[in-house]
Amino acid sequence: MSDFIDLRVRYRKRGSIRYISHLDMNRMMQRAIARARLPVWYTQGYNPHLYLTFALPLSLGFESESEFMDLRLVREMSEAEFLARLGGQMPEGVELCAARPPVHDVRDIAWCEWETRLPVKDPSAVEEAFRALLGGPIEVEKKTKRGVSLTDIRPMVADVKMQVSPDALEASLRCRAGSETNLNPSLLLSALCTHTGDDARDADILRTAVLCVDGTPFC
């Protein structure tokens, strides 16, 4: 029998906390766990450290309804007590949603769903340009382990729903995600903006779901 209990914490990240880097989020979580005095498991050996891992860390400036952090406890604790103790140490913009034993392996992740809002000068023209862009290959410069290369990202976009407001294009996207193939939605918006003259850096990007290969929610 193992001497620890695996736990997966799901949380939201909204507001100005989106400008905190993943490294700083990791440090913040470690300090919060220490303040909450949770019975966490530390690695063995000469330099023990807290076991803490994150699935698909967000890019800087993105918000999310589905963030995941894995840790280990050395004794059982109710979900309600865990959430109350750790939740009381969270900064503004971070809200804990659940803390349960993991069901899926991170290698099961295949898709992410996103909500994007791109301020534009001419929404109707941008909507037309977006539909045209999605009708063929979309080649962008993408960083890989071998460097930067041109990649067709169109096959990484499974579903797009869009609508226009008086000053913006709003799009719901389902994009490939995971350790093997992962599409940052800002690449798609940047490709669009090369045709419209708008600035993809002005976009608000929210991750709404992380999904497994069969479309079920990762948990």
Image (spheres, rainbow, N blue to C red):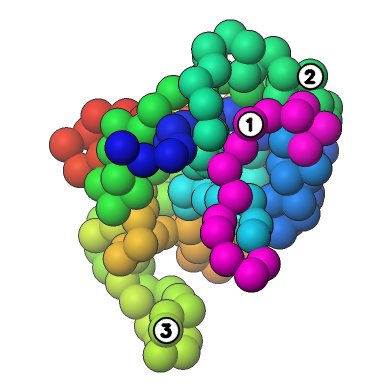
The residue at which mark 1 appears reads as: 39
Q: Which residue is mark 3?
A: 145
The stretch drawn in magenta includes residue 188: no
Depth check, front residue: 208 or 180: 180
Query: Which quarter of the image is occupied by the N terminus?
Result: top left
Which amino acid does the dot numbered 3 rest on? Lys
Three-letter code, disc 1: Pro
| Mark 1–mark 3 distance (CA, rounded to whole Å) | 38 Å
Neighbor class of circle 2 (other Cα within 10 Å; few <14, some 14-19, many 20+) is some
Question: Is 158 on the left or on the right of 87, as rendered?
Answer: left
Main secondary-structure element of the magenta-colored stretch: loop
Would residue 198 appear left or right of 164 to someone viewing this image?
Answer: right
For image coordinates 73% across by 45% down, the residue present is 30
Q: Is residue 55 above or below residue 95?
A: below
Q: Is residue 112 left or right of residue 119?
A: left
- The answer to which of marks 2 and 1 sits earlier in the sequence is 1
In the picture, the disc for residue 88 is 2
For the record, the magenta segment spans 34-47
Residue 4 vs 81, above or below: the answer is below
Tell me if mark 3 has few (under 14), some (14-19) or many (20+) residues whose alpha carbon lies within 10 angstroms of its own: few
Callout in the foreground (2, 3)? 2
Closer to the camera in the image, 139 or 210: 210
Asked if residue 36 lies in the magenta stretch, the reply is: yes
Q: Position of residue 208 (x, y in %)?
A: 48, 31
Q: Residue at x 47, y 48 (%)?
A: 55
Query: Answer yes or no: do the residues labelled 1 and 3 have beta carbons within 8 Å?
Result: no
Camera-side residue: 118 or 153? 153
- Outermost residue, left side: 214
Q: What's under tag 2, amino acid-wise?
A: Gly
Q: Dividing the picture into quarters, in which one does residue 82 lie?
A: top right
